[in-house]
């Protein structure tokens, strides 16, 4: 029989149970969740062997399982303690949910259980990265969890073979105060100075960052756009978000106006 870790039915959405993963074969099964969620090639999958060693050296490895199929993982969260300049916090490296289970509440629940377990370790902050062109993740991170981004990371990963021709893998670094649980806020309407807006499918010319509350548009379905337009959005958002964060702003929400979405940036301090 497989070895099972602690289960958290009280924090799991209906029809699922989230539990700590401790069995070597269960770690291996989490590799398939990544492939289902993101279509990863073998070299991009975080291996079960890394989950295994992390789980006994301070890391948190969570799996989500249907109640009627308790051996088949459909979601995972993975993170580990991070250390820099004397500070210690939890860095979340992976959150994945099988596309067939999106909309079930699993992503929020996995993150919340991860938050609770990090608090058990005495940690009070969690970080992770996400692609600012993926609005589904922006809505989760900023709107549903109530986290914020204060750091822009250009060219953070090398995800293709050709450095010169690769699509830039920029990321926003999310910071979450673990004293605050998920908020499940309704997406606000866009209020503030629109410093980046779409002109047709492409981004317009960025405007100066001359207000305390800024809005930067981001396409809802960037994957449907041709590569040159996706690249133009990447560079426009890099200019606006990167420039604003360097000047003391934080990305605090994703606003909606019909079929349009806008990052909300607020000056801090």
Image: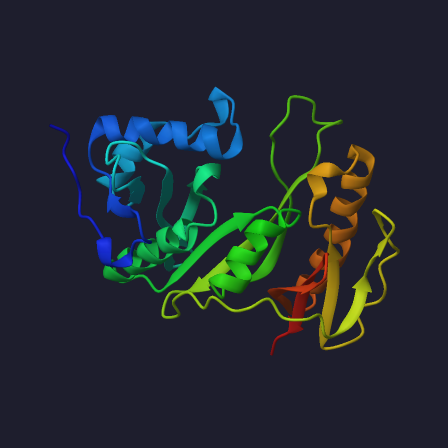
The residue depicted at 60 percent of the width and 79 percent of the height is 269
Display colour scheme: rainbow
Q: Position of residue 73 (x, y in %)?
A: 32, 35
State the residue in front, 77 or 174: 77
- Image check: 156 left or right of 214? left
Q: Is residue 157 above or below residue 171?
A: above
Q: Quadrant of residue 150?
A: bottom right
Q: Is residue 195 above or below residue 79?
A: below
- Image check: 66 left or right of 92? left
Q: Quadrant of residue 33?
A: top left
Q: Position of residue 156 (x, y in %)?
A: 60, 41
Name the residue furthest left.
1
The residue depicted at 47 percent of the width and 20 percent of the height is 42
Q: Is residue 58 visible?
A: no
Tell me how many marks there are: 0
Q: Is residue 63 visible?
A: yes
Quadrant into which the N terminus falls? top left
- Image check: 229 left or right of 215? right
Q: Position of residue 54 (x, y in %)?
A: 29, 38
- Image check: 267 left or right of 44? right
The residue depicted at 69 percent of the width and 45 percent of the height is 221
The residue depicted at 25 percent of the width and 30 percent of the height is 26
State the residue in front, 174 or 19: 19
Q: Position of residue 96 (x, y in %)?
A: 44, 41
């Amino acid at each position: 029989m497989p070895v099972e870790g602690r289960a958290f039915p009280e924090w799991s959405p209906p029809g699922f149970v989230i539990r700590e993963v401790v069995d070597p074969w269960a770690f291996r099964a989490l590799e398939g969740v990544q492939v289902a969620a993101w279509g990863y090639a073998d070299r991009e999958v975080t291996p079960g062997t890394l989950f295994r060693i992390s789980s006994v050296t301070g890391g948190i490895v969570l799996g989500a399982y249907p109640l009627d199929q308790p051996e088949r993982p459909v979601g995972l969260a993975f993170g580990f303690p991070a250390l820099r300049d004397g500070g210690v916090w939890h860095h979340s490296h992976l959150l994945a949910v099988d596309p067939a289970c999106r909309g079930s509440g699993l992503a929020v629940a996995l993150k919340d259980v991860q938050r609770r377990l990090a608090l058990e370790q005495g940690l009070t902050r969690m970080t992770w990265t996400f692609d600012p062109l993926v609005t589904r993740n922006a809505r989760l991170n900023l709107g549903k969890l109530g986290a914020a981004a204060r750091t822009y990371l250009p060219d953070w990963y090398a995800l293709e073979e050709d450095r010169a021709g690769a699509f830039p893998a920029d990321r926003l670094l999310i910071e979450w105060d673990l004293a605050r649980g998920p908020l499940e806020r309704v997406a606000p309407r866009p209020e503030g100075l629109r410093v980046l807006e779409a002109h047709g499918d492409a981004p317009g010319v960025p405007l100066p960052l001359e207000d305390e509350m800024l809005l930067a548009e981001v396409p809802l379905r960037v994957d449907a756009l041709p590569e040159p337009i996706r690249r133009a959005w990447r560079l426009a958002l890099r200019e606006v978000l990167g420039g604003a964060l360097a000047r003391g702003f934080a990305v605090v929400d994703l606003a909606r106006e019909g079929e349009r979405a806008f990052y909300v940036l607020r000056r801090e301090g």
